[in-house]
Image (cartoon, grey):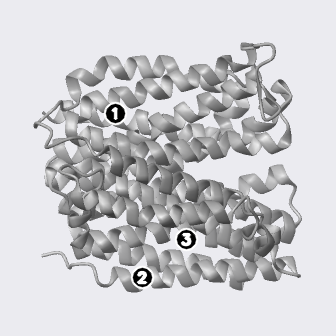
Amino acid sequence: MKNKNNITLIILFVGVLMGALDIAIIGPALPAIETGLGMPARAGSWVFTIFVLFNLLGIPLMSKLSDRFGRRSIYVADLLLFGMGSLLVALSRYIVIPGVTLGGLDSRIIMLLLGRGIQGFGAGGIFPVASAVIGDVFPKEKQGGALGLIGAVFGLAFIIGPILGGVLLTVGWQWLFLINPPIVLVLILFAPRYLPGKTKKANGAFDRAGLLSLFILLGALTVGINQIDTKNFIASALSLNVWPFFIIAAAAVPLFLFFEKRASDPVINTKLYRNRRLILANILTIGAGFAESSLVFLPLLATVVFGYSESAASYTIIPMVLALAVGAPLFGRLLDKIGPRKVILTGTLLLSTGMAVTGIFLGSPAWYYIATIIIGFGLSSLLGAPLRYIVLTEAPPDFRASLQGGLSIFTGIGQLTGGAVVGTVIAGGQNMPEAFRAAYFTVAGVAVLLFILAAFLKKRK
């Protein structure tokens, strides 16, 4: 049994790693893709954005289907979609259809964006379904360690991603995506033997209306936030490119709740969110996503404040990423010994300290590195295992994946919001160093609020 569980964990680990890598490698690969396809700069940002958008849309659907039809079939379907999307992205440079354009983009760019969307949609289900499998298969005393190992994937992805990207870009950017299909095929061969299948009959009709309203809510929110110009926040927020999407998202909220209360088998069972621990876990994950989004501005800080080149600045976050990769399995193991409350309190304290140190000692490279390591360990206690451990503990088996999916959705909302807020604070400052100081003090304040909220989590018996 132990050996079987180890193989199960490897299958889950590699699947989640592939999805995370295709976010981490797109930054280094984007210039080569833009050059190779003659892509205009305005379309380049959509290579990342469309993945995020469809990833958010895939989370609730795949999570719910996993609860209805079993982990194995949906995990395999997610892998297949991810592999097909990867193949389409890799081959897009050869798909030339004369006369086919969309918004001034030729068929090659259209196919690349379509492939990225399919990739994101498949990847959306991989992490929540993998988390649910751990709850189904692993004994209670081993779940924290298993979740911690899966959580370490995101730190590893940002270490491996740039290195792998640098190697494969020497032979062509398409190889960044062509390596995925063979790995997908191997995982699919092993999945039927080691992943759990269907365990129950579906209860009632599928909640199509609830899913559609949730798609509208998440899609409008993502597009609206991504259209905001942080350098001119007020004007862009009041433009037709932004505010109509926020109105659509706001209108979709009561519509979604209306359908969920009446559905026989809702996409997200809102009744379960009356549980205090689940409410706290989801609020904490919004805050964790908010804090995580601020990390993308650290290389810019190193460029502006320390005078590093862009390439050198990108390497300054390696100590933080290493701390994240080490901290996730470490905190995961601690979960099985001391419980999530102490782990999350420790993590939020570290996170708030690291963000505050970044602001206080802004001009010192030595303190910058110390602060990023503290931040890495702090985030690993939130983005890795602890919050997912709480959800596994509180979720009924029939709703494990959908509640894990809800956690991923709230993380994404936190990331989108945090990116807009931190970017606006930085762009709005007259003095750039002081603007960075204000931005990281803001994130430190959010982390302090998370620490206070974590104190209300139930103590381990």
Image coordinates for residue 51, horizontal then vertical, percent: 59, 41
Secondary structure category for the residue under label 3: helix
Q: Which numbered circle lies on residue 118?
A: none
Asked whether disc 3 touches disc 1, contact meaning CB atoms under 8 Å apart, the reply is no
The quarter of the displayed image where residue 408 is located? bottom left
Q: CA distance from mark 1 to mark 2?
A: 33 Å
User: Judging from the image, what secondary structure is the residue with disc 1 in?
Assistant: helix
Q: Residue at x 56, y 84 (%)?
A: 445
- Quadrant containing the N terminus is top left
Q: Earlier in the sequence, mark 1 or mark 2?
A: 1
Q: CA distance from mark 3 to mark 1?
A: 29 Å
Element type where label 2 sits in the image: helix
Question: What mark, if any, has residue 374 been given in the picture?
Answer: 3
The residue tagged 2 is 451
Figure quadrant of residue 360: bottom right
Q: Specify whether 298 is left or right of 216.
A: right
